[in-house]
Amino acid sequence: MSRSWQGGSTRAWRKLRARVLHRDGYRCRIELPGCTTVATHVHHTLGKAAGDDPAHLLAACAHCNLKTGQPTADPAPQPRTRW
Ligand SMILES: [Zn+2]
């Protein structure tokens, strides 16, 4: 049994990510308001715990990926406080 990096960036993940980005043509598939359309991230539609199956991965721009977060651990939107 080989020890892989838990939750980190592995060689396999980088390869898979590149494949998903290529599959989706480097276009964001989430397209939330404010989307930059240029996919540089890969979003786990089922959360990272579900594993790295390309069927559950979507190319996403940084904006959408950070906005969407993990569906399994979605923090409530917090109102921005102005000081
Ligand atoms: Zn986007």
Image (cartoon, rainbow, N blue to C red):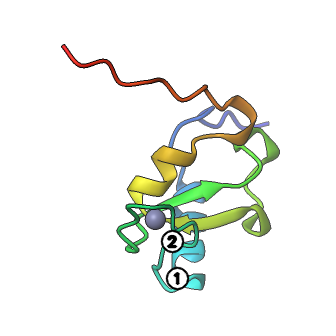
- The residue labelled by disc 2 is 18
Q: Which residue is at a point 49% across and 46% down the rendered structure image? A: 67
Dot 2 surroundings within 10 Å: few (below 14), some, or many (20 or more)? some
- The residue labelled by disc 1 is 22
Counting labels gives 2
Quarter residue 12 falls in: bottom right
Residue type marked 1: His
- For the residue pair 33 and 12, the one nearer the viewer reads as 33
Left or right of residue 81: residue 72: right
Left or right of residue 79: residue 8: right
Figure quadrant of the N terminus: top right
Q: Which residue is at a point 59% across and 56% down the rendered structure image? A: 43
Residue type marked 2: Ala
Residue 17 point in image, percent of width and height:
55, 65
Up the image or down, 39 lies above or below 43; here it is below
Up the image or down, 25 lies above or below 35; here it is below
- For the residue pair 33 and 59, the one nearer the viewer reads as 33
Determine whether the residue tagged by mark 1 lies in a helix, strand or loop: helix
Quarter residue 19 falls in: bottom right
Q: Which residue is at a point 35% across and 68% down the rendered structure image? A: 36
- State if disc 1 and disc 2 touch (CB < 8 Å): yes
Residue 80 point in image, percent of width and height:
35, 24
- For the residue pair 35 and 21, the one nearer the viewer reads as 35
Marks 2 and 1, how far apart in space? 6 Å
